Amino acid sequence: MKNIWKYISNLGIREDDNESARRTIMLNNKLNFAMLISLVLLLIYVIPSMLFTNKPISYSNLRIVILIGFNFLNLSVAGFGLTKLSRLMLVFIPPVIFLLGPTFFGYVEEESYTYYPYVLICTSIIPQLLLHPKNERFLFWLSIAYYFVMVLFIDWFMVHFQTTQFPIVDRINTFYAFYKIAQIVLFIFVHACIYYLLMLNFRFEDELHRKNRELDKQNLELINQKSEIEFQKDELVRKETSTWQKLVNIISHEILNSAIPITNLAGMGSQMLEDESGAVLKPTKIDGEAIEDIHHGLKIIESRTRALINFVTSTKSLTHIPSPIIRQIRIGELFDRIIVLFQPRFKEKGIQFEKHINPPDLTVDADMELIENVIINLILNAIEAMEDIPVARLSLVAEKSELNQVHISVTDNGKGISDDVLEHIFLPYYSTKPNNSGIGLSLAQQIMMLHNARLEVTSKPGEGAIFTMIF
């Protein structure tokens, strides 16, 4: 039965029908099918009762058969794709078959005089379910007018076409005006409620469609953001892999730079202490030149070993930064300590130095020694960058930003930094200077990260650089 109901409901639906049209077609088919089943069941009840009572076939029995045929025809019409015709037939034809037909033939029962108008009021709900008041204005209001006219005149039709006078008509004529007004008021009330509910439903549907569009837009934005995050994640993995590759290359290069000379010199020294058979020479048989070469080789081995130790020590410092002891420190006190440390060097290098703190009592929550190390590192880099500048200028500025952040900036007018170098400037072991470990800025960035802060740099070649610590 479920499959039959589904099949009947989808009769005449096309793939290009929108959701509203599909709902209307399905409702029309369901109403037709429900009427068909109801009338068939009624006919199954009527036929045996006629056989047992020997009653002749009346028009009311014939009316059931006609309505069954009508509903079957209507479903067939829908099945052929003529869904609009099927809908109009269901809206306008049943009252003609059920009410007007019997009346014109003079078949009117006495009680029909009272219940026909109310049957019309009930059946007039059907077209309001099937017709769209916005898209089908003419048919919508025509259907209301059609049923309203029948409600007004159905009792007049019955009196006019009946073959005998009903006593009930004489009784109702005494209060006919009130009787008819009650029907009109009920008709208007029912359809006003239906119209209001339809408009309310349309408004809710419009709002729902609007919100669905917004959600679709937001969903699309989320999908785009997800794709962007995935892309950034992949990019981060690529950069991380690239960073590790560079790190391994740098460490390998540094170790090989020391290990290869050490190995070669050790081998050469060992050969100088052996004869042709590989036996160790006695000290008396080693000439002075060989002793000097061995001594010189040992000095080089010592130097390269010390360089390797320093490299390992520097590497270790990247992973063994002490946990910061956070306390409130005065920026003025921090700057004074740094100025005392660098004042002689500024004079020696002829560097014009200036400091600025706004407000003068500005404080920051940080570890004094670690932050001092960061600023010292930045100033040392700035001094190197201004090595060949005729008039070197360096400034140390601390101020509070509009976002209530503390900014400490070290600004120089040195050679500046190219974009290629800026991209790698905070990588461990990256340096453009010879004999430089390349861990200073990386260490400074890690110290800042331990303070939940960051270190930023802006620079252009020939225009100096600005390193900003943001707390």
Image: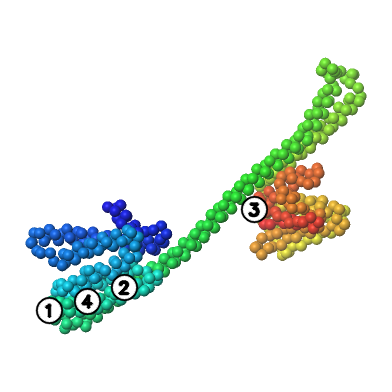
What is the tally of numbered marks visible in this picture? Answer: 4
Query: Is residue 22 among what the camera can see?
Result: yes
Task: Pick whichever of labels 1 and 2 is earlier in the sequence.
Answer: 2
Q: Is residue 156 left or right of residue 8?
A: left
Rendered image: mark on residue 452: 3
Is the C-beta separation of discs 2 and 4 under 8 Å?
no
Q: Is residue 38 placed above or below 262 in the rendered structure?
A: below
Q: What residue is drawn where x is 80% and y is 60%?
A: 354
Q: Which mark is residue 143?
A: 2
Question: Residue 6 in the image: x percent, y percent?
Answer: 32, 55
* Mark seen at residue 317: none
Question: Which is nearer the N-term, disc 3 or disc 4?
Answer: 4
Any part of residue 196 in sight:
no
Q: Secondary structure at mark 4?
A: helix
* Mark toward the start of the polypeptide (3 vs 1): 1
- Please state which of residues 134 and 429 is positioned toward the viewer in this rendering: 134
Viewer-side label of 3, 1 = 1
Residue situated in front as seen by the camera: 234 or 118: 118
Q: Earlier in the sequence, mark 1 or mark 4?
A: 4
Q: Where the C terminus falls, by quadrant?
A: bottom right
Q: CA distance from mark 3 to mark 1?
A: 100 Å
Kindly identify which residue carries mark 1: 165
Q: Residue at x 75, y 35 (%)?
A: 255
The residue type indicated by label 1 comes to Gln
Assign a secondary structure to mark 2. Answer: helix
The residue carrying mark 4 is: 154
Q: What amino acid type should be assigned to the residue bearing mark 4? A: Ile
